[in-house]
Image (tube, helix red, strand yellow):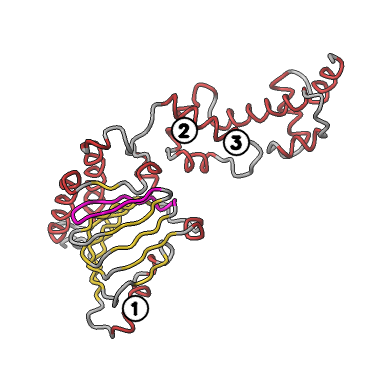
Amino acid sequence: MASQTVRVHRYTTADVAPSDRFDAWQSHWPNVGPLFSIEPLEAFRVSSELVRLGEIGFMYTDIASQRWKRDKRLVDMGQDTIAVAVNLDGKAAGIAGRNDWVQMPGSAVLVDHSQTSLHDSAGGRSIGFSVPRQLAIEVGLDIASLHGLVLTPAESAMLTSHMFQVREALPRFAEEDAPRLGRSMLDMLVLTLKGASRTEAHGFREDPATLMLRARKEVQAHLGSPTLTVANLCRKLGVSRSTLHRLFEAGGGVQAHIRDMRLEAARQALLNPDNVERIGDIAERLGFSDAAHLSRLFRARFDETPSECRARSILSR
C-alpha cells in the first residue's frame, strides 16, 4: 500500500461573503489568535496553504493588507517559536522589540514570538515557516538577536528558492518524509544567515566566556525568585539545556551554581553587621524552603551554621 503524500491544508475566502471573510478565516486558523491581534487595513481576502513538516510549520499565503500586533499579553500566553517570512510582491514595516524594520519585496524578516512586535503588511504573497525555539537553539541560532532582522533579496535568495522547490516537490513525498523536508529549510536558514555578509557574526551563539558572564548576571539578578529555574534560564539566555549544562559542568552543574551563589549571598548577609534580618527571613528571601534547609546546606558548604557565622561576625567587630 502506497504511503500517503504530505498533506497540504488549503484555505480560501473566495467563496465566502466579503463581510464574513475575516471571521471565517480566524475560525479556520485558530492558531493565529494566540500569535497576533490582527486588524485588516483593506477588504479582507486570503488564499493560503499550510503544511506540517515535522516540528516546522510551512506556509504560502496571498493575503490582504493587515496590521499584526503581538503585545506582552500575547507573549505571556506562550507560542515559543521563531518565524521567517519572505514577502514576494508586497511590503511591510514595523517594530520588533525596540528595533524598526522595513521589508521590501523579495526580502525576508525574522520574528521571535517570545518578544513583542507590531507591523503593517501590504497585500500580497508571502512564503515562510516557523520553528520551535528549542529546535532553533539546538542548531546554534541566537534567537533573541534575530528579532526584526531583515535579509535583502540577494541575501535570502537561496532560502527563498529552496522554499519554492520544497512547495513544488511536496506531492512527490510521503508523510514520513515531512520532518526531513522541514529540517532542510531550517538548515537552509542557518546557511543563509552565515552567508549574509552583514550577519557574519550575528545570530549565532556567543563564545562560552561571554555566555557564562551573562548566565552569572542572570542568576545573581534573580537569586531569590521562584522563577530561577533551569528552564527559565535557558529561555532567557536563548540556549539549550545541554549547552547550559556544559557551561557549568566543571562546577557541578547549573543547580549547584545557583545553590552556591545563594549560600554565598546568605553568608554575606550574616557577616554584615548592619543586617538585622532573621535567619528564616534570609532563607526565604534567597529561595531556600526554610531556615533548617539553609542551615543544613550552609554547614555543608562553610563548616559552620548560619547562627555560628553571625556570632563569629559579631565577636570579630
Labels 2 and 1: the sequence-earlier one: 1
The residue depicted at 59 percent of the width and 44 percent of the height is 227
The spot of residue 194 in percent (x, y) is 24, 36
Instruction: State the residue position of label 3.
Output: 221
Q: Which amino acid does label 1 sit on?
A: Ala
- Residue 102 is covered by the magenta coloring: yes
Task: Say which mark, if any, is on residue 24.
Answer: 1
The spot of residue 200 in percent (x, y) is 26, 33
Labels 3 and 2: the sequence-earlier one: 3
Residue 79, relative to residue 137: is it above or below?
below
Task: Say which mark, if any, is on residue 244.
Answer: 2
Q: Nearer the viewer, residue 109 or 239?
A: 109
- Residue 90 is covered by the magenta coloring: no
Q: Is mark 3 on a helix, strand or loop?
A: helix
Q: Nearer the viewer, residue 211 or 66?
A: 66
User: Is label 3 or label 2 in front?
Assistant: 3
The spot of residue 147 in percent (x, y) is 37, 47
Q: Is mark 2 on a helix, strand or loop?
A: helix
Magenta region, residue range: 99-115
Q: In which quarter of the image is the N terminus?
A: bottom left
The spot of residue 53 in percent (x, y) is 26, 55
